[in-house]
Image (cartoon, grey):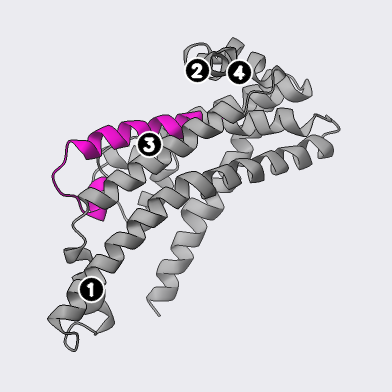
């Protein structure tokens, strides 16, 4: 029971609960909670998603709509829905644990660079605990999706408005991507990452929090702003 209570305490008392969970190397339950919540939101979305408008829009953009038969269109819609179901489950069961493992590896490299050695299992605990706010986001998203009869991809992105862009109205695509980086759950995760890294390596908390923020800025700049912008520019050529 203690192995479950300690990770949950991170939500209530992160300053004291995070170091305690890191020192006890609690990473199994946080990963299970993360996998369950992400899989639940992905699965329920696939069951509520009306894929027809999105599939038709994609076919129209590619020029295939004029040549596809009604039976083929129905098959494509069903296939797309099934892919969404499998993808939603796979994201929780496989992708998120791999993300935690990759994050732990990055933290190990950072600890080596700063000459603050730490046991890898502790760093794995830091990564898993830091992703708990993401699990909470998906738990809230699951409840919101459950209250809907049908959903579109655009609609599901608006169900839990947790980033700055959701409150600023109409923005240019570039500014919308920048505003999306100021996200409550992501910043919460960043704070837990800093507290956990300080506990695992003995680094002062203030310095560890700044380091975690720098890592998040680098992550957001590349994956949330840079790559989507490059894809949009490539699609426009």
Helix, strand, or loop for circle 1? helix
Q: Nearer the viewer, mark 1 or mark 2?
A: 1
Q: Are marks 1 and 4 in contact (CB under 8 Å)?
A: no
How far apart in space, not on screen, are marks 3 and 2 (Cα)? 16 Å
Tag 1 residue: 75
Characterize the magenta stretch by its predominant secondary structure. helix
Viewer-proximal residue, 36 or 54?
36
Which residue position holds label 3?
138
Nearer to us of marks 1 and 4 is 1
Badge 4: few (under 14), some or many (20 or more) residues near its Cα, within 10 Å? many
Q: Position of residue 216 (x, y in %)?
A: 57, 40
Sequence order check: which comes first, mark 2 or mark 4?
2
Residue 5: image x %, image y %? 53, 14
Quarter holding residue 76: bottom left
Q: Is residue 183 visible?
A: yes
Of callouts 3 and 1, the N-terminal one? 1
Residue at image position (19%, 89%) is 67
Q: Residues within 10 Å of mark 3 (few under 14, many from 20)?
A: many
Q: Which of the marked residues, 3 or 4, is nearer the chain's N terminus?
A: 4
As displayed, is residue 67 above or below residue 31? below
> Does label 3 or label 2 sit earlier along the sequence?
2
Q: Is residue 172 left or right of residue 237?
A: left
Q: CA distance from mark 2 to mark 4?
A: 10 Å
Q: Nearer the viewer, mark 2 or mark 4?
A: 2
Q: Residues within 10 Å of mark 2 (few under 14, many from 20)?
A: many
Of label 1 and label 4, which has the lower sequence position? 4
Q: CA distance from mark 3 to mark 1?
A: 30 Å
Q: Which residue is mark 4?
A: 18
Which sits earlier in the primary sequence, circle 1 or circle 2? 2
């Amino acid at each position: 029971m203690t192995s479950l209570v300690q990770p949950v305490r991170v939500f209530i008392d992160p300053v004291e609960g995070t170091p305690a969970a890191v020192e006890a190397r609690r990473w199994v339950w946080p990963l299970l909670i993360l996998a369950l919540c992400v899989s639940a939101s992905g699965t329920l979305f696939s069951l509520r998603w009306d894929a027809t408008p999105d599939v038709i829009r994609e076919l129209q953009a590619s020029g295939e709509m004029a040549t596809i038969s009604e039976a083929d269109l129905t098959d494509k819609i069903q296939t797309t829905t099934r892919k969404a179901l499998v993808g939603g489950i796979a994201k929780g069961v496989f992708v998120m644990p791999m993300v935690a493992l990759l994050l732990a590896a990055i933290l190990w490299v950072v600890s080596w660079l700063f000459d603050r050695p730490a046991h890898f299992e502790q760093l794995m605990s830091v990564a898993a605990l830091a992703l708990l706010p993401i699990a909470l986001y998906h738990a809230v998203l699951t409840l919101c999706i459950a209250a809907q009869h049908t959903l579109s991809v655009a609609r599901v992105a608006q169900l839990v408005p947790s980033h700055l862009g959701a409150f600023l109205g109409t923005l240019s695509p570039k500014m919308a991507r920048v505003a999306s980086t100021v996200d409550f759950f992501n910043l919460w995760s960043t704070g837990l990452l800093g507290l956990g890294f300080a506990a695992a390596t003995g680094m002062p908390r203030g310095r560890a929090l700044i380091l975690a923020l720098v890592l998040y800025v680098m992550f957001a700049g590349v994956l949330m702003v840079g790559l989507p912008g490059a894809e949009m520019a490539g699609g426009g050529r």
